Image: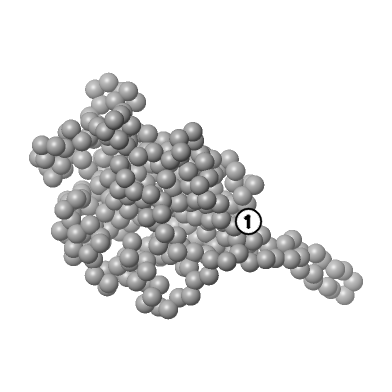
């Protein structure tokens, strides 16, 4: 995700990843000495397990001075066509959040990748995201974080983020989704006119976990699952994307409009994000940062 590096370089931001030590602070008044609670240090936990599969792990970045009343969480979900990729692909996104939103916690997620030998993606990868959210929520008091979440996903990761929010987030813990070139409508002719599409979809779907007669293309299309309860969504698409057509962004935009869900739809010249101009990637980063400030603000008392 070079757009994050571009912004960091463009404004000359200095990033430090070191933890800061803390100590008790004493405030003396005329007749009383008040001992303030020590500020919690920043801490990072890598490869935290949330399931039995070795791929079910996440990295957790907890900021300095966090509290259970204020510190909200940004979840990062990598792409890779549901069959490849790793949380390390989101390193630039981690750097972006730490630099521009240092009071947020970060969860960088791995999920079990689909294989042709019988490990399907849907709904198992949605359920992996759910397991991460549930574990973080259960541990929120010990971690000293507030279990309210924003999600940033790229490509297949954006698809997973939208599906989780639009279908599985029944407790409304997710407050926004940032969708960067995420597939949103598998009923699009771009897919259905591809003779290999149905084969690929059948390999990705765990049929035993869907009701009999389910239209799998519809059931796994975020645009077709939008409701009035869907979270505000930030959409970024390329006008010449060979993997996710612009029509997917347009369809998602239309459904969000119909449901009156707050959203912003931005189209850049280029393909699947890796060839966007510096101006486009800077614009994307600034809009993403504004979305975080708007929908997942951390208010320090």
* Residue 168 visible in the shown view: no
Left or right side of 33 for 145: left
For the point 25% across and 26% down, the residue is 214
* Image coordinates for residue 264, horizontal then vertical, percent: 30, 59
Left or right side of 42 for 99: left
For the point 27% across and 72% down, the residue is 278
Left or right side of 122 for 70: right
Left or right side of 22 for 101: left
Which quadrant of the figure contains the C terminus?
bottom right
Residue found at the far top of this picture: 212
* Residue 44 visible in the shown view: yes
Residue found at the far right of this picture: 31
For the point 48% across and 47% down, the residue is 58
* Image coordinates for residue 197, horizontal then vertical, percent: 16, 37
* Image coordinates for residue 141, horizontal then vertical, percent: 63, 46
Closest to the observer: 41 or 223?
41
Which quadrant of the figure contains the N terminus?
bottom left
- Which quadrant of the figure has residue 194? top left
Residue receiving disc 1:
67
Does residue 198 lie above or below 34 as drawn? Answer: above
Closest to the observer: 274 or 104?
274
- Which quadrant of the figure has residue 196? top left
Q: Secondary structure at mark 1?
A: loop
């Amino acid at each position: 995700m070079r757009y994050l590096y571009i912004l960091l370089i463009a404004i000359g931001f200095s990033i430090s990843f070191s933890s800061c030590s803390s100590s008790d602070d004493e405030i003396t008044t005329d007749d009383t000495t008040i001992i303030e609670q020590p500020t919690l240090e920043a801490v990072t936990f890598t490869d935290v397990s949330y399931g039995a599969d070795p791929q079910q792990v996440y990295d957790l970045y907890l900021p300095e001075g966090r509290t259970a009343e204020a510190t909200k969480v940004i979840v990062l979900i990598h792409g890779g066509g549901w069959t490849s990729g790793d949380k390390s692909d989101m390193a630039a996104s981690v750097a972006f959040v730490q630099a521009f939103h240092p009071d947020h916690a970060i969860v960088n997620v791995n999920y079990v990748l689909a294989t042709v030998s019988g490990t399907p993606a849907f709904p198992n990868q949605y359920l992996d995201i759910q397991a991460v959210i549930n574990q973080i929520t259960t541990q929120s008091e010990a971690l000293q974080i507030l279990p309210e979440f924003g999600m940033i996903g790229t490509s297949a990761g954006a698809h997973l983020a939208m599906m989780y929010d639009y279908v599985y987030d029944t407790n409304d813990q997710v407050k926004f989704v940032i969708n960067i070139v995420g597939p949103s409508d598998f009923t699009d002719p771009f897919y259905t006119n591809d003779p290999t599409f149905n084969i690929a979809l059948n390999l990705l779907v765990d049929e035993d976990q869907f009701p009999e007669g389910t239209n799998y293309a519809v059931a796994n299309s975020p645009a077709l699952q939008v409701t009035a309860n869907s979270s505000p969504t930030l959409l970024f698409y390329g006008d010449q994307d060979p993997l996710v057509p612009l029509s997917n962004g347009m369809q998602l935009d239309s459904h969000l409009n119909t449901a009156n869900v707050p959203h912003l739809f931005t189209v850049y010249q280029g393909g699947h994000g890796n060839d966007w101009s510096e101006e486009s990637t800077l614009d994307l980063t600034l809009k993403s940062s504004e979305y975080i400030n708007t929908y997942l603000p951390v208010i320090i008392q």
